[in-house]
Image (spheres, grey):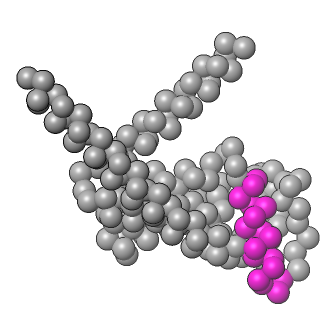
Amino acid sequence: MQKEFSRIEKLKRLVRLYYLKVMRINASPHFIAMGVACGVFGGCFPFIPGLPLQTAIAVAAAFCTRSSKIAAAIATWISNPLNWLLFYYIQFKIGSFLLPMDVQFDPAKWAVTDFMEIGWQGVTILIFGGFILGIPLAAISYFFALHFVRRYRKRKALRMLSRRTKL
């Protein structure tokens, strides 16, 4: 029981560490939020073992939008080993609905090691589905990140002000 607790605590600490790294970027809230949106967009693409597709897409989008590359790279972790199968399932359903390709594939019974067995049509479906999924998720994440960055900075300013008035 103790090992599970420590793993959960480690995960919480890791999430908090990256949250604080994004919040402490010395830039405007819009710059950071756009970087997070680019990262979420890139994170919606399928993870291909050995190929940093998600990070490359996120950083390239951050360059194009002139936003935070660090926030973009961190935000790609929206897609992580804990939820890859869910993302693949949603991407495949969206892609196969919109593209007229017939690929026999069940993401619910699939492992990451089987990625290359679906062929290029299957990869195309996953990438297209990730693109379509990434657009609304990026827009939503922009507004969430903007809100959280502004709230974090407001609280930080209030803490600093209260410390100065106590002296």
| Residue 77 is covered by the magenta coloring | no
Instruction: Please state the horizontal and vertical placement of residue 148, each as a whole percent of the image.
Output: 40, 51
Q: Residue at 67% of width from left, 45% of height from top?
A: 81
Instruction: Please state the horizontal and vertical placement of residue 154, each as a whole percent of the image.
Output: 28, 46
Q: Height in image: 99 above or below 27?
A: below
Residue furthest top in the image:
2
Instruction: Please state the horizontal and vertical placement of residue 103, each as a whole percent of the image.
Output: 87, 74
Task: Give the quadrant of the C terminus.
Answer: top left
Instruction: Please state the horizontal and vertical placement of residue 87, each as a whole percent of the image.
Output: 71, 58
Decide if residue 5 is on the left or right side of residue 91.
Answer: left
Q: Residue at 83% of width from left, 83% of height from top?
A: 101
Residue furthest right in the image:
104
Q: Quadrant of residue 128?
A: bottom right
Decide if residue 97 is on the left or right side of residue 6.
Answer: right
Q: Which residues are magenta?
A: 85-101
The residue nearer to you, when weighing 159 against 118, is 159
Q: How many labels, in total?
A: 0
Whether residue 26 is visible here, answered yes or no, is yes
Q: Residue at 61% of width from left, 53% of height from top?
A: 79
